[in-house]
Amino acid sequence: MPTLGQNQYGKAETRIVKVTREGTTHHLEDLKVSVALSGDMDEVHYSGSNATVLTTDATKNTVFAFAKEYGIGSPERFGTLLARHFTESQPTLTRARIRMESYAWERIATPGEGEHSFLRDGRGVRTAQITHDREEGWEALSGLTALTVLNSTDSEFHGFLKDRYTTLPETRDRVLATDVTALWRHRWSGPQDATPDWNASHAAARGHLLDAFARTYSYSLQQTLFAMGSRVIDHRPEIDEIRLSLPNKHHFLADLTPFGMENETADGAVYFAADRPYGLIEATVLREGATARIPVDATNL
Amino acid sequence: MPTLGQNQYGKAETRIVKVTREGTTHHLEDLKVSVALSGDMDEVHYSGSNATVLTTDATKNTVFAFAKEYGIGSPERFGTLLARHFTESQPTLTRARIRMESYAWERIATPGEGEHSFLRDGRGVRTAQITHDREEGWEALSGLTALTVLNSTDSEFHGFLKDRYTTLPETRDRVLATDVTALWRHRWSGPQDATPDWNASHAAARGHLLDAFARTYSYSLQQTLFAMGSRVIDHRPEIDEIRLSLPNKHHFLADLTPFGMENETADGAVYFAADRPYGLIEATVLREGATARIPVDATNL
Amino acid sequence: MPTLGQNQYGKAETRIVKVTREGTTHHLEDLKVSVALSGDMDEVHYSGSNATVLTTDATKNTVFAFAKEYGIGSPERFGTLLARHFTESQPTLTRARIRMESYAWERIATPGEGEHSFLRDGRGVRTAQITHDREEGWEALSGLTALTVLNSTDSEFHGFLKDRYTTLPETRDRVLATDVTALWRHRWSGPQDATPDWNASHAAARGHLLDAFARTYSYSLQQTLFAMGSRVIDHRPEIDEIRLSLPNKHHFLADLTPFGMENETADGAVYFAADRPYGLIEATVLREGATARIPVDATNL
Amino acid sequence: MPTLGQNQYGKAETRIVKVTREGTTHHLEDLKVSVALSGDMDEVHYSGSNATVLTTDATKNTVFAFAKEYGIGSPERFGTLLARHFTESQPTLTRARIRMESYAWERIATPGEGEHSFLRDGRGVRTAQITHDREEGWEALSGLTALTVLNSTDSEFHGFLKDRYTTLPETRDRVLATDVTALWRHRWSGPQDATPDWNASHAAARGHLLDAFARTYSYSLQQTLFAMGSRVIDHRPEIDEIRLSLPNKHHFLADLTPFGMENETADGAVYFAADRPYGLIEATVLREGATARIPVDATNL
């Protein structure tokens, strides 16, 4: 007889926008929320009995109702409220994982009028994942994705292994570009704990990632990745672990020699920005003594 | 015998990045370029003779070589150089249309170091299309797409027709959100003409669109569209025509009454942001006396 | 004063699935429907008065109600019912354009049981566009998109123009691959006319496109395109015009010479399938004497 | 000092097409290959020394060279060749994971001519992942994704938990539709082992998934999932574990009562096919005694 292993279910990708009014100044919160619940679920798989199943529709309703009743504040805070609600209100639900994307908006300035006009900020997406398991306790991950950055110099690549299939020339000056996806784990062990200022913590971590990317003179994308991750660990005591996934968005020098033209990096050059294939560099950076808990492929989700 | 009608060919979606160095301060230009050529092309269709055909590969090479040799400067300037080159250098090519997307980058501040680190700015994409036809002359279109904006109030919708299938309630206060796609036609009639400062013109038009969206107290998305278009026409004498395509990104008030909760707009409310279907509002706004030349579906391309 | 030009509005991308039961044998129809209406719409743009506006929400309701009341049958038939309804029921609506995508499903065989299990067929998407304008009358377009095909031989490319930027080698044997997008116009001039068997006509046209692609020994993608289009015109008297848009999905021979290996087409070869850039070949093929009415960029919509 | 945790790198999404010629009958293999390597990589992260790094460009070259030299045969066979090559040829590389997507093509019939014309089959994508770790040994996963299926009846949903936020009505007859993503683990423990006929095994597993989906009278999507997974385990002794991820693609009955119409399932009905949010049901099914090794989120990759 086949048996049931790990399983989870819930409503994925609920898109919720909350407007908060302070006179004629409005504030906007914009989230995508995915709920995944686990627990006493053998019978629903074996016989289709739904007696232990809270409907995914109800989990969606809960997202809207909680946003109205308790507010959002930050993805991490909102995810904590939701995860606790599910695991505490239903005996059959022993574990809840709330995944979120959060979209930033900036104001469109309208001097002399109310402030309720917004422009969506496309510079990366904030992510978070809050998990509560009645036995294993709490886990808070924060992150970001789709943050596209480029250094037009201060990147070299040479001294690598040469095997039969190696044809890549070494380079002393190249473009280094990537879409940053990062996911970091907070030391925070649950609501009973001192809670970080989630928004301030996220803004600081994002700033460190950008700064380390920009200031690292790079001999490999791995080195840049490690510099980015350790910068966050070094400056943010509330963060114990960070996983980074960095595609190497290749910018190839266009070959203009057939046209009698030079295309030298040092003179400013013209590049072909390729789509696929691309290098993909992934690694975890840990605070000394910390245990790695973020799964290898977690940043791809 | 079937006959050949309008036809065009070329290399689509060439991705080119140009770095310009001014000491340790670098500048970035990032474009997607699509070339479409027409002319004496009957035989290639009828018999496969390529004697009049410049290869699409050569048109791609030309994009890189021209960027290096003449620089980009703006999509409109670069498109003009390319279109002229094709129609003037090959007798068999009588028409060239250059379509471009241009991606903005902002600097990552690194005080005390060189300025060569960049963050891609995701707030909309700049577009342009330059066409040269030996008989019909020149046409310059500029535009933008993927600019997502939202007003959290100052939008009403009522007084509409009611037919058998009308169930929508009237509203005095709703969220109005859209992804702006706009395409405008310059009065400019070719390189012999006084040339606008393309970058300044684009920045100004974009600013007017945002400002008109934000400041218009709206009774319909059509009214907002017209306000946006006429603002551009009124303030930019170099622009004669503008086509706008505005999806109505519906934000539905979540129904919380089953949970004993009110969800009133005036108190700040929680919305479900829907994907599909969506309203789609499209219109052309013209300077008085100008002839409409932008095709009805041009903004969808 | 800026003035209003061409404008249209409606609900886009309504996804509707209809199940028809014949005992335990079920039939599935699966459509995406986009409605675009025009007419007496000046005031809604100028002042926001909605007195002449049927809501986009009502147009969506109409799609569902009509599917139930009158059935779908084919995208063309369903679009005709909808377009006529809008232009005939509201004095302010003088023009309606119904765009559709139709998704095919095949049965999952379950011998001995009812027939109500389906697998979505991903081999292309059927499209249609029905327009009724009170003055200009009717127009019926049918088409398809996302039909990916490949010939692994019988394609050459040589004898082309060589300019300063031409570096492409000539080839006597290459892979020819494309994603077919086609849109054809029926001679049909409205419901008073004899109506084609829309489904049979579509299946036949699709078959001719595939067969002509496969059987044409090709010296250029333009030649293949024309062969595909004229095959349809030659065999389907109900069709007067066809527009094709064929990206040249480049398959480049991998260069294995650095590894001491040959990679000859004639021996069977290994190709790199590139994404961007790509050649893009577009043309209209007409029945002799027919007037071209399909817009140049209609296939990109 | 922050320390380095799990890390991997390689070339992602290399698109390779191989043509094999048997006279005028050609065969097509079409893969996307992503290589991820691990090993002695501390220094490249800490200091940027690339002395232990095989370039991602060389891994890409290896994909093309191996396809030519050894053929593909199946994703699993090809992945095995590649993984072994990397771990055996470079002392610094101790682990290699090869991920693949494989795209099916069917022939376009051209009686009387050679057989070298193909139509891409969009009914799902075959996936595979082969991992070799010098210490942990071999692992072979096979799977599929994007297989869209629908039952138009024989699905009920009732008897679920009701909490404060539950508003969903129970139903005795609904549409059940999903996009199947599945990943299964073979008992196979490496090339020294008896090797399954990978292609036959995959075709059989796919067939069982479809058949179980179609034939299960469903009281919940979880039950259908378990039936699909256990059917594979029961019939394929070479497979020990399977992970399924099934979005519940909601088809909501259109509410036609405002128009005086009934829309009853039993009469054949009209549904709104929604995009987001959607239920998401995930579970692992195991052979009795087998250990779960497929990660919880592996199907999302």
Image (tube, coloured by chain):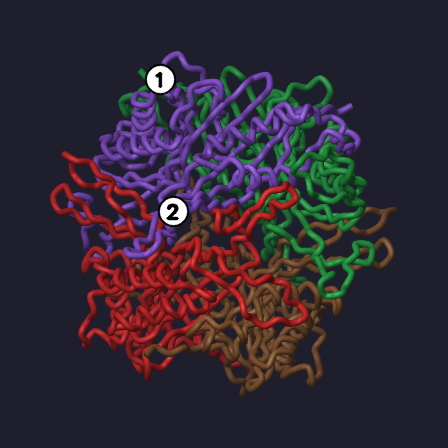
Chain colours: A brown, B green, C purple, D red
D198 displayed left or right of A132? left
| Amino acid under disc 1 | Thr
- Do we see residue A220 in this rendering? no
Residue C274 lies left or right of residue A55; in this view the side is left
What is the chain letter for disc 1? B
Comparing marks 2 and 1, which lies closer to the viewer? 2
Amino acid type, callout 2: Trp
Residue plotted at (72% across, 74% down): A197
Quadrant holding the N terminus of chain C = top right
Residue B244 vs A285, above or below: the answer is above
- Point 37% across, 61% down: residue: D213
Q: Position of residue C145 (x, y in %)?
A: 41, 38
Q: Which residue is the site of mark 2?
A: C105
**Residue C294: percent from left, percent from top:** 47, 24
Please tell me whether mark 2 sits on a helix, a strand or a loop.
Answer: strand
Element assignment for label 1: strand
Q: Quadrant of residue D142?
A: bottom left
Judged from this view, the residue extending furthest toward the top is: C289
Q: Position of residue D123 (x, y in %)?
A: 35, 51
Residue A214 percent location from the top left of the image: 58, 62
- Observer able to see residue A163: yes
In the image, residue C17 above or below residue A279: above
- Residue D87 drawn above or below residue D275: below
Cα distance, mark 2 to mark 1? 35 Å
Which residue reaches farthest left?
D23
Of C100 and B10, nearer the camera is C100
- Give the residue pinned by disc 1: B3
Count residues near mark 1 (Cα–Cα under 10 Å), then give few for <14, some for 14-19, many for 20+.
some
Q: Which mark is residue D22?
A: none
User: What residue sits 40% from the left and 32% below the top?
Assistant: C182
